[in-house]
Image (cartoon, rainbow, N blue to C red):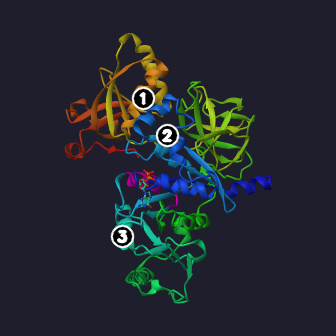
């Protein structure tokens, strides 16, 4: 491989930020982009959404709800690395796209609100990262406010998430009394709200403040030193291998809003964050990013970014080699070979045409309905598929019909396409073949309804049937319809497999006790 391209690939760091809404993801993203010079003024990420694409009906949903429907991709350079941040929707109405975005990154940054600790959505996203075994870095935010005790937060990480942790730094005081962080990794104290020239104080070989400073006399300093002694004696050791295998999370404390500790976090993170990682193909081969041939997979398809054209954009994570505009690629699923003339790159919500991109990068390909989620594209003619993306267990369900029965053909066509695109999951009842849609977040239904109307000209009626516990069945042949009831509905999924939709966890257990021989399982 060309040395220059190899060098480019090894510069890539591709990650997602995971958090519960309001933990500070947008704020920290702005600061990161600001360091990278990608935005002039930290504080424009949110503003942009109402700018350029304001007329788009897609964005209309975002505007109405004041949330981000889709994950965007941001790229910037810092310390000789090229960083790709894949954003994940932060509202509780997040969707399967959020999960799938985590399939396209090499590491994750988890933001935790110091006052709230681990929250529901963080836990869900964490589990997906954990399943992939990718490194997870933790930033505990809002130290400028009173929060939980740092030791308590560390304990919570280990107990709730079941991951080992190592504090890279430690807060000295908190809230109004926040003095700074004791940086175990860089052997210094970083003072809060202090000019850059005076911000860093050195430590002596015993790990004590090496200079005479008023901070030394405070109880906060004494407390921090006691905590650190405890961590040194009883805490985990820092272990790079464990970080890379996702078994130990390095923990950083800071305050995104006041831009404190964010740069130190970024610098340290970049020392350990993985370069683009290899990926398994379904023929058993492992494809190295430094392989000459271009290859990648589609993890997301987004429609209607441009209101003037009803186009879609397929997001491709490049796994190996180099992508060049105008190159010939083969879509593995169909074997079709074609020239890619239109490709986009994503930079802080601005779309630019991309001419060259390499392994680790995300590109957008214009799509007129050729691509599906999980598709593999390969340069040249020899095609293979990457391992299938996991399917996620939906939690919310609606029964859906066309308001106008004469539109039934369009109705089914629309559903088929949106299901293939991965926008929503499809189920049908056994004999009556009524259509049931499943989703991870409520927003998916709204997007479905909106798109059916605008793209397929079909108004739909949706009847919520609430949240259900969906379970697939290993031994389908043993299932009998007599096992169903008002609390355990039996349906088929889009692959014609049986799925039980239980009313709740209780109904699931009750069923399992009664029919022990039925082997239920859930997707991710
Ligand atoms: P997101 O929903 O995770 O993207 O969270 P935002 O970045 O929008 O932040 C949610 C709220 O928390 C906003 O009002 C922020 O100004 C505030 N916030 C973010 N970081 C900090 C911080 O370090 N300290 C304090 N006090 N507030 C913060």
Region in magenta: 121-136
* Magenta residue check for 128: yes
Residue at mark 2 to residue at mark 1: CA–CA distance: 14 Å
Q: Is residue 506 left or right of residue 443?
A: left
For label 2, the crowd category at 10 Å Cα-Cα, with few meaning under 14, some 14 to 19 and many 20 or more, is many
Residue pointed to by mark 3: 155
Q: 132 and 142: which one is in front?
A: 142
Q: Quadrant of residue 503?
A: top left
Residue pointed to by mark 2: 70
Q: Quadrant of residue 500?
A: top left
Q: Position of residue 387 (x, y in %)?
A: 55, 44
Residue pointed to by mark 1: 448
Which of the marked residues, 1 or 3, is nearer the chain's N terminus?
3
Q: Position of residue 103 (x, y in %)?
A: 52, 48
Residue 373 visible in the snapshot: no
For label 3, the crowd category at 10 Å Cα-Cα, with few meaning under 14, some 14 to 19 and many 20 or more, is some
* Magenta residue check for 410: no
Above or below 510: residue 245: below
Question: Which element type, helix, strand or loop, lies under badge 3?
Answer: helix
């Amino acid at each position: 491989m060309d040395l220059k391209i190899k060098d480019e690939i090894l510069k890539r760091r591709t990650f997602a930020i995971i958090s519960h809404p309001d933990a500070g993801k947008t704020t920290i993203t702005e600061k990161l982009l600001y360091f990278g010079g990608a935005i002039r003024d930290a504080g424009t990420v949110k503003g942009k959404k109402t700018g350029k694409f304001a007329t788009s009906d897609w964005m209309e949903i975002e505007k109405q709800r004041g949330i981000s429907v889709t994950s965007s991709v941001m790229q910037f350079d810092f310390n000789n690395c090229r960083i790709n941040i894949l954003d994940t929707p932060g509202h509780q109405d997040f969707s399967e796209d959020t999960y799938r975005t985590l399939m396209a990154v090499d590491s994750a940054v988890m933001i935790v609100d110091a006052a709230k600790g681990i929250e529901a959505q963080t836990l869900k996203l964490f589990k997906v990262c954990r399943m992939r075994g990718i490194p997870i870095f933790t930033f505990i935010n809002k130290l400028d406010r009173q929060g939980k005790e740092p030791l308590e937060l560390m304990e919570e990480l280990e107990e709730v998430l079941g991951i080992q942790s190592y504090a890279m730094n430690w807060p000295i005081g908190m809230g109004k009394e926040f003095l700074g962080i004791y940086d175990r990794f860089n052997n210094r104290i970083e003072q809060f709200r202090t000019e850059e020239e005076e911000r860093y104080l050195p430590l002596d070989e015993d790990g004590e403040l090496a200079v005479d400073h008023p901070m030394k006399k405070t109880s906060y300093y004494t407390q921090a030193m006691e905590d650190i002694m405890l961590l040194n004696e009883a805490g985990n050791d820092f272990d790079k291998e464990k970080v890379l295998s996702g078994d130990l999370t390095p923990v950083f404390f800071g305050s995104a809003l006041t831009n404190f500790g964010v740069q130190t976090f970024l610098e340290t993170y970049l020392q350990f964050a993985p370069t683009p990682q290899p990926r398994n193909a379904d023929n058993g081969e492992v494809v190295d990013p430094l392989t000459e041939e271009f290859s990648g997979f589609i993890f997301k398809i987004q429609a209607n970014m441009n209101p003037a054209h009803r186009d879609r954009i397929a997001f491709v994570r490049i796994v190996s080699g180099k992508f060049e505009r105008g190159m010939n690629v083969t879509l593995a699923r169909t074997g079709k070979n074609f020239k890619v003339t239109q490709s986009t790159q994503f930079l802080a919500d601005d779309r630019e045409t991309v001419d060259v991109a390499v392994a680790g990068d995300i590109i957008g390909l214009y799509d007129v309905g050729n691509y599906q989620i999980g598709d593999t594209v390969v340069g040249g003619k020899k095609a293979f598929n990457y391992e299938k993306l996991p399917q996620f267990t939906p939690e919310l369900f609606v029964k859906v019909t066309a308001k106008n029965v004469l539109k039934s053909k369009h109705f089914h066509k629309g559903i088929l396409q949106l299901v293939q695109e991965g926008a929503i999951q499809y189920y049908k009842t056994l004999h009556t073949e009524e259509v049931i849609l499943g989703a991870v977040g409520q927003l998916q239904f709204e997007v479905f309804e909106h798109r059916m109307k605008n793209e397929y000209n079909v108004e739909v009626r949706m009847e919520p049937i609430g949240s259900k516990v969906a379970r697939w069945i290993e031994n389908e042949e043993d299932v009998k319809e007599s096992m169903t009831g008002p609390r355990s509905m039996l349906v088929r999924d889009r692959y014609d497999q049986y799925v039980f939709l239980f009313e709740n966890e209780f109904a699931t257990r009750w069923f399992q006790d009664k029919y022990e021989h039925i082997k239920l399982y859930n997707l991710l």
